[in-house]
Image (cartoon, rainbow, N blue to C red):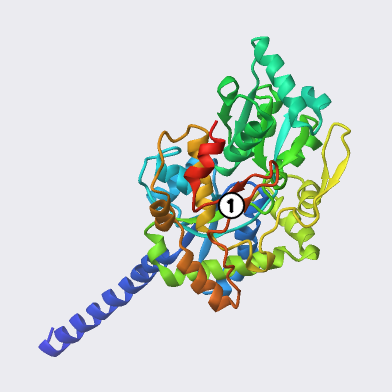
């Protein structure tokens, strides 16, 4: 081989090797940019799922895969390890984990935005039917069971999560002694099956599992979460800490979910959404059950009639009022942990909410989306059930009056 031919061969071989390596590099780069968002089989995963189904993630330049999770504990672990970049998640979970109630204390799971208000409930077994919607009568039945040596057991979905707080707040307002009943953790999609076989006497969970419980005859809807706290924070877009620094990608995800949230609050779109999320890929529940409660029409079960929750059924946007992650909400959850004995001493409230709630990021995204940001992050919170006012600027004053 002449020197010229040899140089030409080496040049050609080098070029071929370089070109064959390029696809491998590009594939790896694409994988690193892919965003996996976890969700649990609940109606309020709708904005995360519909943002994908409607093509909004692509519209805002992000490559997203939504991935069903088995439980909230699995969601927490996926976020902490980085297997998930973000998740449809209980608003209370980051505070629970950081404070050590529901995970390794000090682990940060930042909150980018709130996904929905309302739409959870407490379902009681048929034996409580005589009590109906009266919590005092429920207490009488609970006390009778305790006296007979058969204390009831109630289920929620994650220690310190929203469903745990709605259950405990309801029990406190009814005067039920939480130390004398069982409180267990069950993943949302498993609630109805566990009630059927007698593992608990009531459960606190999101839809559609209260509606499904009614449809399958395992119990009745005793109280909805909007009757406990109207327009309460429920699920949030919670992040893997490292992903929170990928600002452009994160903003694209948030813009897509905000657009889907707005779409979901158009009543005529809810039936289509119910059909989509009801499929086995997502919630795996009857579309008609999902749709009825999305529309605010609740068959309460056990012949107790139909109640209308129009205006305070599950909502996803409310002109942006839903989605702003208020620090005062985080302080409310931390105060309840103390109130109910999950925390033995006061946390540094302001430090915790400043660490976990990305208010400034949300303000930036909202501004780019043309949304007005509410000016009420630390306003007093009026509870609906017992009319108690919580001032996030003075949690100690609240606890002095209401600790149980």
The image position of residue 360, as x and y in percent, is 46, 68
Q: Nearer the viewer, residue 144 or 21?
A: 144
Residue 176, position as x, y percentages in the image? 65, 26
User: Percent from the top left, x then y, of residue 288?
Assistant: 81, 49
In the picture of the structure, the residue carrying the numbered disc 1 is 235
Residue 116: quarter of image: bottom right
Residue 1 as seen in the image, left or right of residue 390? left
Can the viewer see residue 251?
yes
Q: Residue at x 65, y 66 (%)?
A: 260
Residue 325: image location, x then y, percent: 54, 60
Q: Is residue 14 above or below residue 331?
A: below
View extreme (left): residue: 3
Query: Residue drawn at (18%, 80%), measured in percent from left and top?
Result: 10
Asked whether the viewer can see residue 240, the reply is no
**The C terminus sits in image quarter:** top right
Q: Quadrant of residue 222?
A: top right
On the picture, is 364 further left or further right than 188? left
């Amino acid at each position: 081989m002449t020197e010229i031919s040899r140089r030409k061969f080496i040049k050609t071989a080098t070029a071929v090797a370089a070109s064959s390596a390029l696809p491998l590099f590009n594939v790896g780069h694409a994988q690193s940019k892919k965003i996996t968002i976890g969700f649990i089989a609940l109606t309020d995963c709708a904005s995360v799922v519909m943002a994908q189904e409607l093509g909004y993630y692509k519209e805002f330049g992000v490559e997203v895969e939504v991935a069903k999770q088995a439980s909230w504990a699995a969601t927490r672990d996926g976020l902490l390890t980085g297997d998930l970049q973000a998740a449809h998640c209980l608003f209370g979970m980051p505070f629970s984990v950081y404070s050590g109630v529901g995970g390794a204390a000090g682990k940060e799971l930042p909150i980018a935005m709130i996904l929905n208000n309302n739409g959870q409930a407490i379902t009681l077994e048929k034996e409580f039917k005589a009590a109906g919607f009266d919590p005092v009568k429920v207490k009488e039945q609970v006390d009778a069971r305790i006296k007979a040596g058969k204390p009831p057991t109630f289920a929620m979905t994650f220690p310190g999560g929203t469903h745990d707080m709605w259950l405990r707040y309801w029990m406190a307002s009814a005067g039920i002694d939480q130390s004398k009943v069982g409180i267990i953790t069950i993943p949302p999609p498993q609630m109805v099956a566990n009630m059927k076989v007698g593992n608990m006497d009531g459960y606190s969970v999101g839809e559609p599992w209260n509606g499904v419980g009614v449809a399958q005859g395992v119990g009745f809807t005793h109280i909805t979460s909007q009757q406990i706290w109207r327009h309460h924070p429920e699920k949030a877009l919670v992040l893997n800490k490292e992903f929170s620094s990928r600002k452009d990608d994160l903003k694209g995800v948030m813009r897509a979910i905000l657009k889907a949230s707005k779409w979901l609050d158009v009543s005529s779109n809810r039936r289509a959404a119910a059909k989509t999320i009801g499929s086995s890929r997502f919630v795996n529940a009857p579309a008609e059950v999902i749709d009825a409660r999305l529309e605010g029409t609740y068959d309460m079960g056990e012949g107790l009639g139909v109640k209308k929750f129009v205006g305070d059924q599950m909502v996803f946007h409310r002109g942006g009022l839903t989605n702003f992650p208020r620090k005062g909400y985080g302080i409310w959850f931390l105060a309840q942990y103390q109130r109910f004995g999950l925390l033995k001493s006061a946390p540094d409230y302001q430090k915790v909410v400043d660490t976990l709630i990305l208010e400034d990021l949300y303000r930036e995204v909202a501004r780019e989306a043309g949304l007005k940001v509410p000016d009420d992050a630390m306003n007093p919170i009026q509870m609906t059930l017992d009319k108690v006012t919580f001032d996030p600027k003075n949690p100690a004053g609240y606890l002095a009056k209401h600790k149980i």
